[in-house]
Image: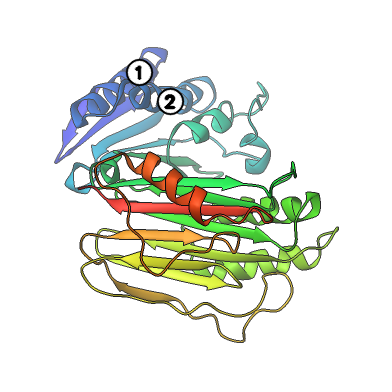
Amino acid sequence: MNIAVTNSVVITIEEPEDAYYVAQEARHLAFELGFSDFDIGMITIAVAEIATNVVRYALPGIATLKKLELDKGIEVTIEDNGPGISDLEQAMVDGFSTHCEPSIGKGLGSANRCVEEFIVNKTDSNGTSITLRHYLPLLDNLIEKIGISFPAVGLHDNGDQYCLKQYQGDKLFACVIDGAGKGANAAVASQYALGIAQKHYRDSFDSIIKQCHCALKIRRPFRPVQMALLRLTPDSLEFCAIGDVGIKIIADSKESFAVHDGSVGLTLPKKIHIHQIDRPKNLTVFLHSDGVVLPNDINLDSQISLERSSCQLYNQVALANDDATLIVIRDKL
């Protein structure tokens, strides 16, 4: 049964048909918000997985569906009255399934991959509560972005890695990671640090850097990395860098950021300084590894695509004898 509560819809899950109703209500709400067909499908799959498992193992349940504030996305919370998930870590593994598990436990890995936020609010002897959130790609209407990265000429392994992660609709996390030296060991170190950064991209920069530092110190073969981290929100720009990596900003207001000496996994500064400023207008950001040497004056051709103009710039500024990575983020013209 559907019950409208302020801006929410509440559906009790008491029989198999109710799981279908919950999934279809999520589909309708996602369509109303303007999600793409692909995202609508992913949201529906995630909701159906959780609601179906309530029916299989943990009746009765309740599903609450609503739009996020400012219509930024959709939120679905599903609660059951089962005895909880005995091994949550195992249940989150893709493909995990057991008919002996007397609560939600089948399809958690699949549901987790389908939506941006998968939150287990609780799981104990009184039941399980899971919240799914998915956001509209609002940032796509505001900025354009590209990352370019290649190994040194003649080498197969790239010691550089980068990430461009859009989240919560209007926020962007970006990082450039440069493994010390070149070759396979540098690539392994940078890939390992990238995995930590991608997993913890919502955390503070201080926390991300320290987690990478501690993990790399005990990893073999040992290689430290240099890191540049950037977060862009509607109101602010945040930046931190350790080692010979850099940032350059072109905007209505001039901004410059210091870069820390040191290496993540070897020697960190005693205090990691995080730079945060109000987001400049007419912004273009260049984030790069030490294999890229940017000139003082950069002119991207606004008459051609960002992809093409950035590739032209990369070909001019990337060093042939080093791994080279360049990220360009620009407000849409």
Q: Residue furthest right?
A: 221
**Which image quadrant: the N terminus?**
top left
Q: Position of residue 161 (x, y in %)?
A: 61, 51
- Indicate the quadrant where residue 12 lies: top left
In the structure shown, which secondary structural element does the residue marked by tag 2 occupy?
helix
Q: Residue furthest front?
A: 316
Q: Amino acid at mark 2?
A: Ala
197 up-or-down from 140: above or below: below
At a point 81% along the width and 60% down the height, the residue shown is 219
Q: How many numbered circles does the render carry? A: 2
Color style of the picture: rainbow
At a point 81% along the width and 65% down the height, the residue shown is 218
**Which one is in front, 98 or 220?**
220
Label 1 near label 2: C-beta < 8 Å?
Answer: yes
**Which one is in front, 4 or 155?**
155
In the structure shown, which secondary structural element does the residue marked by tag 1 occupy?
helix
| Mark number displayed over residue 51 | 2
Q: Position of residue 101 (x, y in %)?
A: 64, 28
- Indicate the quadrant where residue 97 lies: top right
| Mark number displayed over residue 18 | 1
- Indicate the quadrant where residue 249 lies: bottom left
**Which one is in front, 14 or 213?**
213
At a point 36% along the width and 61% down the height, the residue shown is 298
Q: Amino acid at mark 1?
A: Asp
